[in-house]
Image: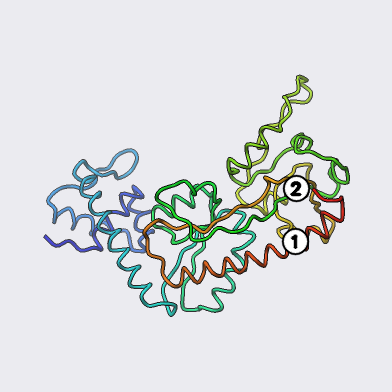
């Protein structure tokens, strides 16, 4: 029996979305076309693949077995399409890069702009998300390459490093009028007396020294213990805006707040040895990386070197000369 791949994609979309409307939208086709496609494939296999329930359209018992093989087959077809596109070199095709919020702020804008200018025939897709979701997307083959915290993926068997980037120092950032601004001998324990605006989950190597530095909760009901983090943000810009209008603090590189430093809105308060970005370029082990992806990886490495140089210059101006260093 020969089944049209188009119909398999129809079934996969309905299984993923549980709704004819949402599945049709994801496929960019009309809903009646999707309905006809599902009826056609069910007629070919001689069994219903879906039943309607309170949760939408869900696979039947046979449908689950059928979809398991169909999804595996489509994954192979998608990989073949990808290999064909990569064989075309830098003239056309698409690459997808996954980044967390900090690489998105520090590296991605410059890298994307340069790559797009130099390789206009290649479509570039950059996905910014929670670092854990970025690695899941890499495992699901939804992206080709990720910029991720090295300590998170270093011990995994299914991921491998393309390159490890030198650490970028991070700073405790507060508004210029913060109660701790201008004081000396500040510790992380002092900083933790104020709300922390966190951008997604911190890696364990950073979280551990923070939690070890927290003071005991106050006994007074007038001053309850601060939750940690006090504020959770989906991106760095939101966290920095909150910091600029409150006594909250966040973590950032100096390059991320260069304009705010020049305007006197934000100041770096503290830099600790463990407070640094340790990123690596990571791919799915044994998955082929095409020339366009490797070219983008090289662009990341070049921009990263520029960022390190800029951070050193900013550190001398805004941190070491201001308060004698960390």
Q: Is residue 117 above or below residue 109?
A: below
**SS for callout 1:** helix
Residue 160: name its quadrant. Answer: bottom left
Left or right placement of residue 106 versus residue 12 in this view:
right
- Point 30% across, 45% down: residue: 57
* Quarter the N terminus occupies: bottom left
- Point 54% across, 47% down: residue: 151
**Which numbered circle lies on residue 312?**
1
Left or right placement of residue 201 versus residue 181 in this view:
left
Left or right placement of residue 276 versus residue 13 in this view:
right
Of residues 28 and 196, the one drawn nearer to the viewer in this rendering: 196
Residue 107: name its quadrant. Answer: bottom right
Question: Where residue 118 appears, x then y in whole percent?
Answer: 54, 79
The crowd level at tag 1 (other Cα within 10 Å; few <14, some 14-19, many 20+) is some
Q: Is residue 288 above or below residue 157?
A: below
Of residues 34 and 186, the one drawn nearer to the viewer in this rendering: 186
Earlier sequence position, callout 1 versus callout 2: 2
Question: According to the image, label 2 marks what residue?
Answer: 271
Of residues 194 and 255, the one drawn nearer to the viewer in this rendering: 255
Q: Is residue 322 above or below residue 198?
A: below
Of residues 324 and 269, the one drawn nearer to the viewer in this rendering: 324
- Point 75% across, 38% down: residue: 188
**Which numbered circle lies on residue 73?**
none
Question: Where residue 87 appears, x then y in whole percent?
Answer: 36, 75
What's the CA distance linking mark 1 and mark 2?
Answer: 13 Å
């Amino acid at each position: 029996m020969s089944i049209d791949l188009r119909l398999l994609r129809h079934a996969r979309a309905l299984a993923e979305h549980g709704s004819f409307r949402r599945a049709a939208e994801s496929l960019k086709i009309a809903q009646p076309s999707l309905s006809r496609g599902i009826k056609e494939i069910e007629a070919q296999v001689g069994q219903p693949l879906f039943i309607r329930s309170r949760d939408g359209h869900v696979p039947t018992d046979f449908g689950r077995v059928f979809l398991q093989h169909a999804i595996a087959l489509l994954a192979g077809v998608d990989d073949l399409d990808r290999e064909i596109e990569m064989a075309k070199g830098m003239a056309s095709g698409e690459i997808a890069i996954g980044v967390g919020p900090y690489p998105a702020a520090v590296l991605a804008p410059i890298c994307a702009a340069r790559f797009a200018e130099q390789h206009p025939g290649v479509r570039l897709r950059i996905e910014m998300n929670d670092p854990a979701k970025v690695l899941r997307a890499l495992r699901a083959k939804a992206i080709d390459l990720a910029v991720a915290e090295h300590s998170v993926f270093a011990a995994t068997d299914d991921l491998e490093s393309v390159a490890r980037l030198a650490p970028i120092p991070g700073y405790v950032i507060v508004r210029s009028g913060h109660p701790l601004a201008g004081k000396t001998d500040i510790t992380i324990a002092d900083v933790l007396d104020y709300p922390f605006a966190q951008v997604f989950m911190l890696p364990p190597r950073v979280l551990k020294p923070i939690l070890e530095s927290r003071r005991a909760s106050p006994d007074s009901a007038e001053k309850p213990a601060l939750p940690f983090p006090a504020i959770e943000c989906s991106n760095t810009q939101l966290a920095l805006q909150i910091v600029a209008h409150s006594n909250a603090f966040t973590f950032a590189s100096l390059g991320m707040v260069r304009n705010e430093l020049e305007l006197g809105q934000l100041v770096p308060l503290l830099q600790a040895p463990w407070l640094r970005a340790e990123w690596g370029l990571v791919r799915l082990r044994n998955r082929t990386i095409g020339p366009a992806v490797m070219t983008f990886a090289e662009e990341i490495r070049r921009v990263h070197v520029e960022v390190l140089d800029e951070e050193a210059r900013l550190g001398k101006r805004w941190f070491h000369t201001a308060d004698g260093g960390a």
